[in-house]
Amino acid sequence: MTEIPVPGTAAPIDEATGVFVDHRELLFGVVYNMLGSVADTEDVLQDTWLSWTARGKGSPLAGVDNPRAYLVRVAVNHALRRRAVISRRQETYVGSWLPEPLVADEGADTADGPALRSESVSLAMLVVLESLTPLERAVFVLGEVFGYPHAEIAGIIDRSPAAVRQLAHRAREHVNARRPRYEAHPRVRREATERFVRAALGGDIAELMEVLAPDVTAWTDAGGKRKPASLRPVHGRDKVARLLTSGRGGPSNPVFRYRRVNGDDAAVLFDGDAPFAVLVLDLTPEGDRVRGIYVVANPDKLAHLPREAA
């Protein structure tokens, strides 16, 4: 079997391993958008790798004309099975459940690092995708995010093209009813995030009232691991403003840093040098008001984040 070097090293790996490595970021992007969990995505990729290396009596490439299509099919089907496990876990979850955020390294641009990992949809969109059935979500991710045609998706999930078209139609209708067609410009999003953090950190209720939309909703996901500000979503500008300025359950040494989270400008709250929470805002299409606030504070969901440099 042909040997190729591991990227960035002189160590050789076999051709089948090299094929998997070449497609790993694509597989990560597809599976993460289906599951909304970094930890579960890594487990699914491990299962995909084991399935890949176990086929063909140790010769994974034997009889595979299109390794990319084969690996995506295996990963998607493993992800569909994992989706059932996650759904059962959510039934007993303490408080609001939010997706596990993907946080870019400090100073990283969207073009830096693995390109396909930036194909992850926004945190707000991942929340909407939670309301789809597993098959609808798989079809939406493959078609709308990664551009797979219906005929190819049919082969991946073992359904007819007509069934895939129906799934895609239902998924698009559901998503479009809950998400605007136009999103705020990145510069506007960054400015709104900075203004929001200044008002919240300074306890300026008057400025917060100007930033928040009348129908704003705030979600806090601490998973019962930290004292959350609220176990349920908080609706309405007055209640959200009071919640944000109450100071309950916050870190003893708060430090905010601005990062890109799931491709959008957001903020990460540190307690000293330890990640404490990820704050993502969902803006109105014009970008002048905050209509959704997502706070991920469950330490299990932040375990993959690096500590803040001194």
Image: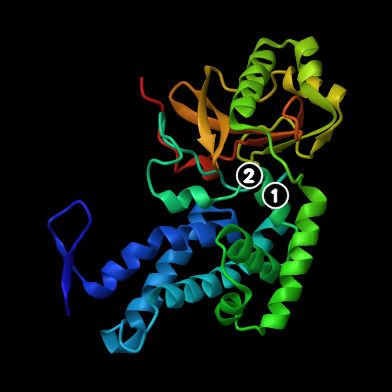
The N terminus sits in image quarter? bottom left
Query: Neighbour class for label 1 at 10 Å: few (<14), some, many (≥20)?
Result: some
Q: Which residue is mark 2?
A: 123
Query: What residue do we see at 82% from left, 52% from top?
Result: 177
Relative side of 283 to 42, left or right: right
- Residue type highlighted by circle 2: Leu
Please state the horizontal and vertical placement of residue 281, each as a whole percent of the image: 67, 32
Query: Neighbour class for label 2 at 10 Å: few (<14), some, many (≥20)?
Result: many
The C terminus sits in image quarter? top left
| Closer to the camera in the image, 212 or 85 | 212
Residue 239 occupies quadrant: top right
Please state the horizontal and vertical placement of residue 298, each as a whole percent of the image: 59, 40
Residue 65 occupies quadrant: bottom left
**Which numbered marker is on residue 237?**
none
Please state the horizontal and vertical placement of residue 71, each as a whole percent of the image: 43, 73
- Residue type highlighted by circle 1: Val
Q: Is residue 233 above or below residue 73?
A: above
Query: What residue do we see at 69% from left, 14% from top?
Result: 199
Q: Is residue 101 above or below residue 47?
A: above
Disc 1, disc 2: CB below 8 Å?
yes
Check disc 2 and report its element: helix, strand or loop.
Answer: helix
Q: Kindly give the residue lying farthest to the left in the view shown.
A: 10
Query: What residue do we see at 77% from left, 44% from top?
Result: 180
Q: Which residue is mark 1?
A: 127
Q: Gap between marks 1 and 2, in whole Å?
A: 6 Å
Residue 286 occupies quadrant: top right
Check disc 1 and report its element: helix, strand or loop.
Answer: helix
Q: Is residue 217 above or below residue 241?
A: below
Q: Is residue 156 above or below residue 87?
A: below
Please state the horizontal and vertical placement of residue 169, each as a whole percent of the image: 76, 68
